[in-house]
Image (cartoon, rainbow, N blue to C red):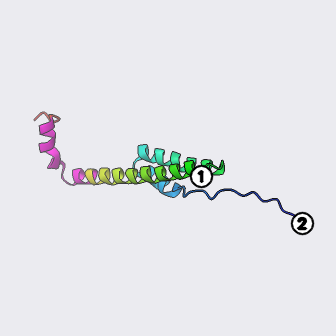
Amino acid sequence: ASQLTVLMPAPAETHAGLAAFSTFMFPPFGAVAVHHAMRTFTTAYNGEKEESASHSSKALAWSIAAIIAGVFLVALFGAYTHDPTLFDSLFNKLGVLNN
């Protein structure tokens, strides 16, 4: 009763869940994070351990960047909806408002 076993390298952490969440926070960066998360698995499957680890760290970095950008935009939007006149002086300096 011999069984055929295939030894595969241990894949690096894909960070796929974090990448998927980051896509909802800031889609442009989140999409890059998802790409690297999926490449982490495929490169590990092909036996490229170093390349897999590289994609894993890139997926994590892009996920963190997407979450930070998303939190910043939500905070900015919240501040603006709370007090729309808050940014008037900034807009005047930039020449956006024609008052």
Whether residue 33 appears in magenta in the rendering, the answer is no
What is the secondary structure assignment of the residue under circle 2?
Answer: loop
Report the disc number at residue 49. 1
- In the rendered structure, which segment of residues is drawn in magenta? 77-94
Q: Residue at x 53, y 53 (%)?
A: 53
Q: Residue at x 12, y 38 (%)?
A: 93
Residue placed most toward the observer, 23 or 9: 9
Q: Which residue is mark 2?
A: 1
In the rendered image, the quadrant that contains the N terminus is bottom right
Q: Position of residue 67 (x, y in %)?
A: 38, 54
**Where is residue 24 shown, x and y percent of the image?**
43, 51
Foreground residue among 13 and 66: 13
Q: Position of residue 28 (x, y in %)?
A: 42, 43
Horizontal side of residue 76 vs 88, given as left or right: right
Badge number at residue 38: none
Which quadrant: the C terminus?
top left
Q: Nearer the viewer, residue 70 or 9?
A: 9
Regarding residue 24, the answer to whether it shows in the image is no
- Secondary structure beneath disc 1? helix
Q: Give whichever of discs 2 and 1 has the lower sequence position.
A: 2
Please give left or right for residue 71 compared with residue 99 in the image. right
Q: Residue furthest left?
A: 99
Residue 15 location (% of width, % of height): 51, 56
Tell me if I can see residue 45 in this picture.
yes
Identity, as a three-letter code, of the amino acid under mark 1: Lys
Q: Amino acid at mark 2?
A: Ala
Please, which residue is most extreme toward the right here?
Answer: 1
Q: Residue at x 48, y 53 (%)?
A: 57
| Few, some or many residues within 10 Å of mark 2 (<14, 14–19, 20+) | few
Report, in whole angstroms, how far the alpha carbon at label 2 lies from the one at label 1. Answer: 32 Å
